Amino acid sequence: SGGQAQREIPFAQPGSLTKVFAIASGKGGVGKSSVTVNLALSMAKQGLKVGIVDADIYGHSVPAMLGVADHRPTQVDDLIMPVPTSTGVSVISIGMLKPRRDQVVAWRGPMLDRALVQMLADVYWGDLDVLLLDLPPGTGDVAISLGQHLPGAEVVVVTTPQEAAAEVAERAGTMASMMHQRVVGVVENMSFLPCPHCGPEHQLQIFGSGGGDRVAATLSERFGYTVPVLGRIPLDTSLREGGDVGKPIVDSDPTAPAAVELEGIAAKL
Ligand code: ADP
């Protein structure tokens, strides 16, 4: 009979019990992937079953941050099994859909759309409580595809305190709203550096200040509902190191202020 019927996306079905959060940012390097993996681990620690779809075509750094950079998903019949991690969070990354890891793929609209649907519909996720999607930065094709396939997804916008970052973060939030997704809050990352000399109450504003508040205020006014700042994560060497070695800070150094803040944000979602 020819072509294969397209499998439906379980998270888009009316009775779906899985909460879907898309983690968005205006530009790269603001910590979107770090926030995604640490929120996922925080939720897993709360006892929730959590999956991550890494749809960041530019970075796809989530597997490395979870210590499974070289892992490939297995296939059972025509279903793809997500890659399990020691944290209990399972993950599928757009980077895993490439035939070879070092291959460069110029993902474009229709191909990206297919890849996104594949990660949502052809992966055996089981009964997840929460699915987190790490979006590419900006307002591109993936955000549009996601809005079309999962309009019920809620969006978390990550920004730094910097004016330029906040401005593009507002655009990413507005894009989500145009796709009928609700923006549930703003995470300000790299908010300050606790002074290593005079003590943590002295906060050095390395990237300026006000970005999170600015994005929250602009989006609240634009959408007509309150978009809160969910938290402010300080700069922390152990957060960066945790990402580099595949042991996110909420597991490797849970009493660090950045980890405590991340767990607080997860508890609000
Ligand atoms: P994005 O996904 O927005 O491109 P990443 O999460 O990959 O950003 O973060 C970029 C780099 O900054 C990574 O090396 C990460 O470890 C580091 N980083 C992110 N947030 C913090 C923070 N609060 N403190 C220290 N380093 C951070």
Image: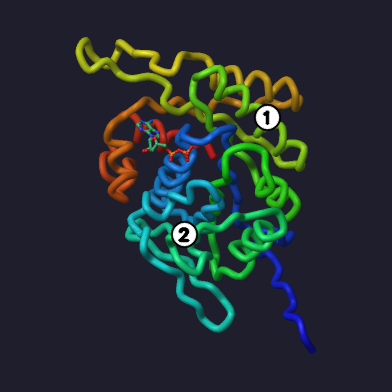
Give the vertical position of 184 relative to 2 (above or below).
above
Give the vertical position of 226 relative to 101 (above or below).
above
Q: Dividing the picture into quarters, in which one does residue 18 lie?
A: bottom right
Residue at the extreme right = 1
Mark 1 closeness class: few <14, some 14–19, many ≥20 residues within 10 Å? some
Residue 171 tag number? 1
In percent of width and height, residue 149 lies at 72, 55
Residue occupying the point 45% across, 28% down: 189
**Residue linked to disc 2:** 91
92 left or right of 222 in image:
left
In percent of width and height, residue 211 lies at 54, 19
Q: Between tags 2 and 1, which lies in front?
A: 1
Residue occupying the point 52% across, 53% down: 54
In percent of width and height, residue 245 lies at 28, 48
Picture quadrant of ligand 1: top left
Q: Are the two marked residues, 2 and 1, in contact with CB atoms closer than 8 angstroms?
A: no
Residue occupying the point 48% across, 63% down: 96
Identify which residue, 135 or 216, lies in the foreground: 135
Count of marks overlaid on the render: 2
